Amino acid sequence: SVNPDLASERRTASFSVEKLTTWLDGGAEQTRLRRAVVEAIEGDPVFSRENQYFQSQNERYEAAVRNAVHLQKKMHEMGWSENGPEFKYIYRAVAGEIAFLLHRVFMRSVSMLGSDEQVAKWIPLASQYQLIGSYAQTELGHGTYLQGLETTAVFDVTTQEFILNTPKISAMKWWPGDMGRSATHTVVFAQLYVHGKSYGIHPFIVQIRSLQDHSLCPGIIAGDIGPKMNFEHIDNGYLMLQNVRVPRENMLSKFCEVQPDGTYVRRGSQKINYFTMTSVRISLISGEAILPLMKACTIAIRYSAVRRQSKLKPGEQEAKILDYQTQQEKLLPQLATAYAFHFIDDYLQELFDRGYREIQRKNFDTLPELHALSSGFKAVVTQFCTSGVEICLRACGGHGYSLLSGLPSLYTKIIASCIYEGENTILLLQTARFLIKCFMASSTGQPIPPSVTYLAAVKPGNCPAKNKLDFLHPDIYTEAYQHVAVRLVSSTAAKLQDLIQSGVKKHDAWNQCTVQLVQAAKAHCHYITVKNFAEIVEKIETKAGIQKIMKHLCDLFALYGIFSNTGVFLHDGYISGAQMDMVTASYLDLLAIIRKDAVPLVDAFDFTDKSLNSALGCYDGQVYQRLYEWAQKSPTNKQMSPAYGKYLKPLLHNRLSKL
Amino acid sequence: RRVTMMNADLRRERAAATFQTELLTHILDGGAERTRRRKEIEALVLNDPDFQHEDLNFLSRSQRYEQAIRKSALMVMKLREYGIADPEEIYWFKSFVHRGRPEPLDLHLGMFLPTLLTQATPEQQDRFFMPAWNLEIIGTYAQTEMGHGTHLRGLETTATYDPATQEFILNSPTVTSIKWWPGGLGKTSNHAIVLAQLYTQGQCKGLHAFIVPIRQLGTHEPLPGITVGDIGPKFGYDEMDNGYLKMDNFRIPRENMLMKYAQVEPDGTYVKPLSDKLTYGTMVFIRSLIVGDSARSLSRACTIAIRYSAVRHQSELKPGEPEPQILDYQTQQYKLFPLLATAYAFHFVGAYIKDTYRRISGDINDGDLSELPELHALTAGLKAFTSWTANAGIEECRMACGGHGYSRCSGIPDIYVTFTPSCTYEGENTVMMLQTARFLVKSYTQVSSGQRVTGMVSYLNDLSRQRIQPQHVAARTVTVRINDPVSLVEAYKARAARLVEAAAKNLQAELNHRKSKEDAWNRTSVDLVRASEAHCHYVIVKLFTAKLAEISNAAVRAVLTELCLLYALYGISRNTGDFLQAGILTDAQVTQVNQRVKELLAIIRLNAVALVDSFDFHDVHLGSVLGRYDGNVYENMFEWAKKSPLNKTEVHESFHKHLKPMQAKL
């Protein structure tokens, strides 16, 4: 039975939860499909995650490999394919507890970087799992800065082979997933040398383990890099190459080739490489950042409706902690953020699809904008979502720290997204570079991409709001965000120019402005998020109460951003001190309004209990019973600890024996 | 022993320092003699083969518990063997043995024994103290329940007095009343001090403490009527058996209620305690420890991140030149140096509270409790402020180490998971902030009604003066000098005064709307938390600034002054809205502050490594490959990884179990 405290929350929903769910999914058919996939996966006991929190690194790795193998069988059984509409829901359903994700990256990079012959040779082997692939780019000494990689591949004309080497310890490949234990092959990125000349970083297919007995190939030293904060089911690995020879044909050569005589030939545009990075960054936003935040909000908000603590009114029952303003102030902005980013994901996806169509027509014009947006949003979304998940964790009091709450695992996993596929600070600086370039171009009247045209059309004047209700007009707050973004971009551009004009070298000037540049890039992404949210709300049909609640969430997201960054809005007086008090008042009013729909708003995310894997967040709200029963299954309660006999007993009897 | 070379970058950094690191270490320790003694105790532990073990990162939870309990047992014996009895020295010894991690006897030593000392009658001390001192009795302190934490009055466990047998009957009447979280309860303890609602003669007399045996001496099996166990895996705290405890009609003799203050007489008559303020003392003490712990945990994370940033080279700053140390990037400095300054600030604040507590605890014993309320309010807020900041700061340090920070070999994940629960335990932080706010509002109300207040809140007195001579905010002359810490203290003071006043006025406005007191308080609580934060921030800047005057060595004072300025100015730059809105700073000054912060980053860059060296963490204590003193990071990461459990066999068994069959089938 459902806990009455949760049941009552659901009875008073101001909108149809089911309608919101289908709208978020993109239609009733998508919802049906997603639920069918989730049901098939979760109904299969092999994929059960009930013991996940009790498992050691070795056990989790084994389970992930087992899941990956079983998934192949399952897909075959269900008639799902990698290109089918179900596929995007499968990963969501297995909740990432699966091996061989890098195998897919291996296949994608062979497809994108390989010649037709190479694709024909390797892809069938890989899709039949005759080999297991990985992708070895990052080294001990270098991550996001690819040009710094130190692994070498020297072409030997006499044998028509490349000789791969790890010349020093910092050149060792470090972190690639699936490489520590599973992979038989990997794509190694190395500095290419032909006839003593360096040609920069290139990809090579290298076999690292025997296809017969899985032992390491000659010249290969590989293994697992040891325990991490999470991802213990993945065997992130190290790889050292000692005079490993691969045939000339193993260099992936769609764009560059070394001919038998050592002639280096470049063909086609390498811009497409940027496009790959862009596609990876956009694709990870949803699954790796927004979904975990939605899960964390679901857990924390449901639990806050069940947990009662202290009294708000004397003589009454203890209050739900969700009724405390400070608790609302922690959780509801995170909920609004999850929604805001859900829509940004749609926005980026659409932009990406449009860009992709252009690129197929060999038009690369949209690439810089797409690259800048995907970099900036990867950084901003992962950072906001990470801090949101942590806020949810800490809003659950002591029980949040139990692994059985599900929150620590969500957190330790999402934090990795701030680093992988480009360290966030570096990505924001890439976005900033684009913004400064566009701002300069616009000031000399050159055309600039659509997402940044606002930089050219600066409106004079201050915020026109007269009372707190004015701050519930999207025009008012969207313009405030726009104003701040323009101010930060233009003032940083001016400072850069001043420094350069005063004789500071360009790169030094850049480094001296990087803190501001990061701030400007964030302000740009924040502005676009607010603007996009407001536009989405505008377009929703008014029925079923969805528009109204989305409008509240949009207002909350926008005002929360102002409330928590008052300084940048006050700085040049665009928003006055008196107006800032109005912002605060409206913001706090919204918390109380959205409070009423908080539980239905997380219900609409439609996570099953199994996918949340949380004692605190289950749909029926029977929190304490679950926590108690689950804890009893902990191995610490099943196995007799040797500690008692070995250490405690002698300790306890220490004195007795002397008596 | 192989002599390793120090990494050239670190050697260069250390040679360029403008001050002697030991002198600063002495200041942090509270004198050269104390540094000497700390290192002596450290050596006792580090040179003792009994305390050696495998890297904990490679052990399972059960193995980590086992190691911890082994070391705890040894530790207790060795402390006595060495005659170490001073609380601070015990603390050092313990933290070297357990390398800053929790251990299963923490609650026995830190709560069970002290509670016996302060709340047991002489007769009870005779019965329990010596057996507990000798570890025949291992106890824990069972307060938190599944359904209630910080809000103690809500606890549901009952202790009903039965005059017929002169026993208390203990019960866990609901699932939510099951004791949940107490450390050492799951597997280690055989006794617990249980907090329960006392019922006698049909009336509830509120929370009282009872000594409850839970396991059979000898067999260690749970006693009939007791259900006890481990609460399962957590975010860190692997060495601790946090437990649950359920009691079903479990009877204990009347004499097991701790009766130094409140008493139940044989016939069931209840005798009230004299004052309930006494329990404040313990809370103040424990919260002051958390402030110190915030400083130390953040210092450890800074040490790792800053040393690693001096060793790691990446990308290019100047075309054609070698890759620079990442510590040379402004964005990296901006992440790390304000945290370094924060670690120093918190260190001095922790020392201040400890001294103050020590000073007034004499008064407390003499029955003079006058200073206690302010200290209580202050430590509640500072506990929350410092633990929140350190919590976020440790994570920033980890992220500043890029991908390698995420590996457990960096040591930062462990520091984080060990530290982060302090945002919740010993009083949930938001609740703590609201306690401080209650004191601030009370002080404000006193000032409004013409009384004067003293101590850290005395700045509120100025508000009443302003009211007598009303002055428009904008008309106030701005006199902040951004290079003068004393002037910055005034700026923080003005900000705190304004936010306290605003919160108090909003609260009054809500009350005027005829809201109930509780409702009005709730509807103002976001403002109240902001006011408390501003107050705490002011106190910290003030204490850091005051510390500068005590430093006699000019070179050390210079570098600490830079850190103090950075701490104060960075705090302004992150909260410019408050200073702008209150008219404390102008737009132009805010721009100057932002600029000055960046200049200070470049200045502190020169001494960054020396400043973390001064924290003087031994490599063993730091537990980090990235933060090694010698800076030989990469080769040691490789050595470390080779010991990973997944690498125990060349071919993992999953290959034979899963991979091979699949490849055969396809």
Image: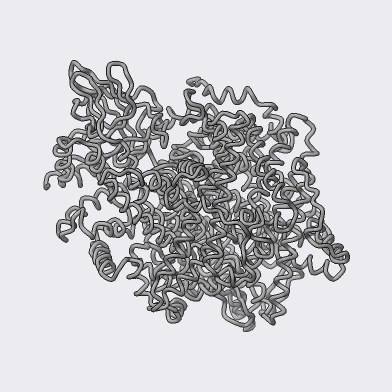
Spot occupied by residue A492 in the image (x, y as percentages of width and height): 58, 43
Spot occupied by residue B199 in the image (x, y as percentages of width and height): 61, 78
Tell me if residue B593 comes above or below residue A192 in the rendering: below
Residue under the image location 74 percent in, 33 percent down: B558
Foreground residue, A275 or B371?
Answer: A275
- Say whether residue A118 is left or right of residue A575: left
Residue under the image location 27 percent in, 43 percent down: A362
Q: How many marks?
A: 0
Residue under the image location 75 percent in, 40 percent down: B483
Foreground residue, A91 or B550?
Answer: A91
Tell me if residue B627 comes above or below residue A153 in the rendering: below
For the question of whether residue B243 can be seen, the reply is no
- Say whether residue A361 is left or right of residue A367: left
For the question of whether residue B316 can be seen, the reply is yes
Which residue in the rendered view is the most extreme toward the front? A445
Scheme of image coloration: one colour
Residue under the image location 73 percent in, 68 percent down: B504
Which residue in the rendered view is the most extreme toward the left? B665
Spot occupied by residue A149 in the image (x, y as percentages of width and height): 38, 29
| Residue B15 picture quarter | top right
Tell me if residue B511 comes above or below residue B46 in the rendering: below
Tell me if residue B46 comes above or below residue A454 in the rendering: above
Spot occupied by residue B579 in the image (x, y as percentages of width and height): 71, 54
